[in-house]
Amino acid sequence: MNKNIILLGVLIIVVGVCWPLLQKIPFGRLPGDIFIKRDGFTFFLPITTCLLVSGVVSLLFWLFRK
């Protein structure tokens, strides 16, 4: 358990350091993401982004389980 917490902390630090580079990736603006902007109202539903993240995380868990 301690090893997992340390790895999670290191991962958070790495993402924090790389954040300026990660913001340039057009993540969250993929085709299939719903974005509606009207007067005084904004709605964003990242369907495609959620599916992509879910697939990548599932693949990583599957690879590390073996």
Image: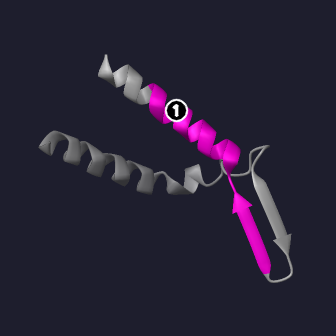
16 with respect to 44 (left or right)? left
42 in relation to 66, above or below: below
Q: Is residue 16 magenta?
A: no
Is 15 on the left or on the right of 21, as rendered?
A: left
Query: Where 13 falls versus 30 (above or below)?
Result: below
Where is residue 21 drawn, in percent x and y? 57, 50
Q: Is residue 29 left or right of residue 13?
A: right
The outermost residue toward the right is: 39
Residue shown at 83%/70% (left/top)?
37
The residue beneath circle 1 is 56
Q: Nearer the viewer, residue 16 or 62?
A: 62
Which residue is at a point 78% across and 78% down the rendered structure image?
A: 41
x then y, percent, for residue 38: 86, 75
Specify the quadrant that holds the N terminus: top left
Residue at the bottom extreme?
40
**Left or right side of 16 for 48:** right
Query: Is the magenta region chiefly helix, strand or loop?
Result: helix
Residue for point 74% across, 67% down = 43
Q: Position of residue 53 (x, y in %)?
A: 55, 40
Q: Position of residue 55 (x, y in %)?
A: 55, 32
Q: Which residues are magenta?
A: 41-59
Quarter of the image with the C terminus in it: top left
Q: Secondary structure at mark 1?
A: helix
Q: Is residue 60 above or below residue 12?
A: above
Disc 1 crowd rating (10 Å Cα; few below 14, some 14-19, many 20+) is: few
Q: Residue furthest top?
A: 66
Q: Residue at x 27, y 51 (%)?
A: 9
Amino acid residing under circle 1: Val
Task: Looking at the picture, tell me which residue is in the foreground, 3 or 17.
Answer: 3
